[in-house]
Amino acid sequence: MYKGASHKIWSVLMVSPFVILFLLFWALPLALGVWVSLHNWNISSGNLGFVSLDNYKSILTPGTLYYDLFMKGLKNTLYFVVISVPPLVLISLGLALIIDNLPRKLKPIYRTIFFISYSISVTAVSAIFLWLFNGNGGYFNNVLESIGVIREPINWLGEQPYAWLTILITTIWWTIGFNMMLFINALDEVDAALYEAADLDGAGAFSKFISVTWPQIRNVAFFIIIMTVIASFNLYGQTKLITGGGPEQSTNSLIMNIQTSVFGMNQLGIGSAMAIIMGLIMMVIIVLQYWLSYRNKE
């Protein structure tokens, strides 16, 4: 009896740090955000009173300033999610497959090479790619001009679709290592006996990937897709520091417009409501992904 009580106490002690951190850094901020979104709350004046769902109505009513701001940011963010998630997943999978087939001594070297960019801050990454894609004297323009590909410098940061292409390349270079490491770990867990059996049956590389590799890493791939969608939805640093939301606010992400509502327009209540709606949209997308995944399994 004493031993059972002791186990329960130790279980509570082990779980308590997670519960405390969950409450402090997720549940309580979320509850506070919902509460603030129901009030007319300014940064300078503070809480000016309860307004119920008026903030949400202002955001979702066509023709209002906040509706245009929210929809423009949402449109840009969804566009980035669509163009960024496939390459971030497929390129990382390709790199993982290549590294998985390297000699054992070379694997740690190449894993480190491709993962090290993920440890660099967004400020440093943005500074690097600002120099690379600068319209006047940028490295890429100089190289393309010197080999005769272009005659005039490309305005990478001031014209579309070049601005989005710059953000996409920056994001891929910066974050590809994280997804790659998850895929490598998943590939390491695939039973080698399955490959040996496939070899005996005369299966080629593509057949082995479809019949052996993919079924074994599918759950990890699904997790990576979800995490990549969430990360792309949170686009902020690259566009803020590289393009500044331009040209003509075409790369303004939803988080940037939420920041504008809060600090530029002094509307913390509106900004909180936008953040809540953004979170709900992300939840709907993730639920749809779960549903599609389970449907494919059946």
Image (cartoon, rainbow, N blue to C red):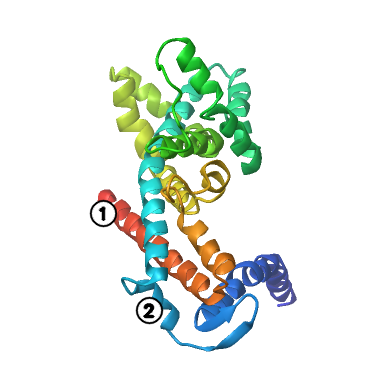
Tell whether 160 sits left or right of 21. Answer: left
Q: Identify the secondary structure beneath mark 2.
A: helix
In terms of secondary structure, where does tag 1 sit?
Answer: helix
Residue behind mark 2: 57
Judge whether residue 130 can be spotted in this image. yes
Q: Earlier in the sequence, mark 2 or mark 1?
A: 2
Q: Residue at x 42, y 57 (%)?
A: 73
- The image shows residue 130 at horizontal and vertical percentages of 57, 34
Between circles 2 and 1, the one closer to the viewer is 2
**For residue 295, which numbered disc appears in the image?**
1
Image: 37 above or below 207: below
Task: Judge whether 206 appears above or below 76 on screen.
Answer: above
From the top left corner, tell me how far across and down residue 176 is, in percent: 51, 35
Q: Residue at x 58, y 44 (%)?
A: 241
Structural distance between the alpha carbons of marks 2 and 1 = 35 Å
Label total for image:
2
- Residue at 63% across, 28% down: 112
Q: Quadrant of residue 263?
A: bottom right
In front: 226, or 7? 226
Query: Which one is in front, 18 or 243?
Result: 243
**Amino acid of disc 1:** Arg
